[in-house]
Image: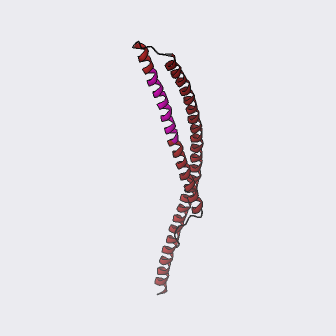
């Protein structure tokens, strides 16, 4: 008898490939998200460090001239804008990540459905093989019986 062959194997292979591609895209977005979150953390850490330095200068009694204060104020405003832009990037990447996550879930459902169908077809194939084996055994037994009765 011929070997088991799933009729929709090419469709299953395509769905598996699609799921893998979705997972890869999701991983890339997650990697980007991680990098952007690190950049945001670096902004926060740098700002805190600079604020500490200015506070130390004030506590030590050093006089801050107007240009240093103005430069620091400008730095804080610019950094706040950078942090805001970075937060927007992160929110956008989180949205993209959720979309890809949903795409992976849908691809997984489609693949799983076909795999279950393949398993069901395989079980039917095995049951049919067992049925054919039993029929062959019965045929052999009937031939032996008829040969004994003939002689």
Q: Which one is in front, 6 or 96?
A: 96
Q: Give me the residue at 58% from left, 62% from top.
A: 10
- Residue 48, magenta (yes or no): yes
The outermost residue toward the top is 61
Q: Is the magenta stretch mostly helix, strand or loop?
A: helix
Give residue 12's quadrant in the image.
Answer: bottom right
Return the residue nearer the eye: 135 or 23: 23
Q: How many marks?
A: 0
Above or below: residue 54 compared with residue 130: above
Residue drawn at x 48%, y 84% is 147
| Towards the viewer: 68 or 151 | 68
| Any part of residue 81 in sight | yes
Q: Does the magenta stretch include residue 117?
A: no
* Residue 94 location (% of width, % of height): 56, 37
Q: Position of residue 25 (x, y in %)?
A: 55, 48
Percent from the top left, x then y, of residue 69?
Answer: 51, 18
In the rendered structure, which segment of residues is drawn in magenta?
Answer: 32-51
- Give the residue at x 57% y 36%: 89
Coordinates of residue 127 in the picture (x, y in percent): 52, 64
Return the residue nearer the eye: 76 or 8: 76
Which residue lies at the image location 51% right of the left edge and 22% below the top edge? 72
Residue at the far bottom: name it.
151
Q: Can residue 116 be seen in this view?
A: no
Q: How has the structure been colored for display?
A: secondary structure
The relative height of residue 79 versus residue 34 in the rendered view (above or below) is above
């Amino acid at each position: 008898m011929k070997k088991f062959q799933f009729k929709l194997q090419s469709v299953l292979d395509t769905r598996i490939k699609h799921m893998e591609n979705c997972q890869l895209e999701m991983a890339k977005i997650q990697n980007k998200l991680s990098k952007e979150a690190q950049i945001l953390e670096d902004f926060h850490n740098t700002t805190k460090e600079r604020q500490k330095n200015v506070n130390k200068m004030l506590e030590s009694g050093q006089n801050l001239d107007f240009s240093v204060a103005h430069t620091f104020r400008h730095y804080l405003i610019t950094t706040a804008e950078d942090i805001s832009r970075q937060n927007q990037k992160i929110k956008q990447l989180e949205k993209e990540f959720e979309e890809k996550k949903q795409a992976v879930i849908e691809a997984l459902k489609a693949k799983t459905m076909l795999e279950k169908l393949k398993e069901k077809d395989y079980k039917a194939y095995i049951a049919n093989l067992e049925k054919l084996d039993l029929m062959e055994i019965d045929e052999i037994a009937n031939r032996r019986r008829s040969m004994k009765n003939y002689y």
